[in-house]
Image (spheres, rainbow, N blue to C red):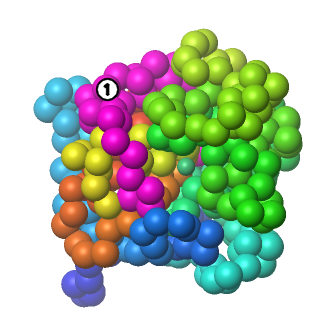
Amino acid sequence: MLYTKRTFDYEYPLKEADVCLVGIPFSSTEIGQPVKYGPLFIREAIRNLMGHNPKTGKNIFKKYKFCDIGDVEVVPGSWEKTDNVITDTIKEIFSENKKVFPVFLGGEHLISLSIIRNLQKMKKSLTVVDFDAHRDLLSDWLGEEHSHITWAYHALKSKVDMVQIGCRIYEEEEQKNFVKFKVSDKIGKIKNPVYLTIDLDVLDPSVCPEVGTQQAAGMSFEELKRELMKLKGSEIIGMDIVECASREAETRTAHIAAELIRTVLEIRKNYAH
Ligand SMILES: [Mn+2]
C-alpha cells in the first residue's frame, strides 16, 4: 500500500479525468511582483479545499474526476519558446482526452494568449470572458509585442469575442482598441464556447494582496462570484487563474484562487456527469 499525498485525494489518469490542472509558472514580462510560484501555492490551497459546499449542496470532488498533470516546463525569458511548449502540451492533453476541462494556473497573464489561440483553432468560435483590473489592450509595451499587458490585444487579433469585467484603469490606446474590437463590458447571453480567464488583480488588494500588479478599488469576492454566476448555462471549455504572486503557503490570495476554481466547476453547465 502506498501512502502518498497528491494535489487531490484521488487522482485519475488524464484519459479518464473530467478536470485537469496544468501549472504554467511563466513570469518573464512582469513589471511588479514575480508570479512564478502561483501554481505551487494554489495547488497547496486546493489541498485544503473542502469539496462540499453547504450553500449549494454540491461537492465537486464527488462529481468530477481530477488529475494534476504538473507544470509546463516554461523557458524563462523566451515567450516564443514557452508558447511552443504550451501549444504542444495543450495538443497532447486533448489528444489524450477530448472532453477534459483544463484549469491552467499562472504565471503571468501572457500565458492566456497561447491557450486562447490554441482553443480558438480547435473551436472556430470562442468568447473569452476576462476578469481583470486592466484591459491589457496595448499593441506593444516598450516595443515588445508579447507582454502581460498586451496579450488581450493579440488575442483579439486572432478573432475571438471578448468580454472584460472589472477593468478600472487603462491608457487611451487601450480604450480605442476596446471600441475597435467591440469588446463588451457586460456578460450577456453567450452562444459561443467560453474560455474564462481570471487575473486575481480584479479583486481588491484587501482581498487578494499578492498579485503581479495591485490596483486599488477592486471587486469583493462576493461581487466576483455574482458575475461568475451569469455564466451559468454557458459552455465553459477551460479556464485560467493568473497573476498569483504568493511567495509562501497559506496566503489568502492562493485560497481565493482555489475557491474560484470550485465556484466555476459548480456552475459549469455539464456539472452533472
Ligand atoms: Mn491582466
- Per the rendered image, the range of residues in magenta is 211-238
> Which residue is disc 1 drawn over?
223
**In screen coordinates, is 93 left or right of 260?**
right
Vertical arrangement, residue 177 with respect to residue 147, above or below = above
Q: Position of residue 161 (x, y in %)?
A: 74, 29
Instruction: Name the secondary structure under disc 1.
Output: helix
Q: Looking at the image, which residue sits at the far top?
A: 189
> Between residues 17 and 200, which one lies in front from this camera angle?
200
Q: Position of residue 37 (x, y in %)?
A: 41, 74
**In screen coordinates, is 72 left or right of 158?**
left
Image quadrant of residue 124?
top right
> Between residues 98 and 178, which one lies in front from this camera angle?
178
Image point (55%, 17%), residue name: 186
> Between residues 191 and 52, which one lies in front from this camera angle?
191
Q: Position of residue 89 (x, y in %)?
A: 70, 69
**Amino acid bearing label 1:** Glu
Vertical arrangement, residue 224 with respect to residue 209, above or below = above
**In screen coordinates, is 141 left or right of 26?**
right
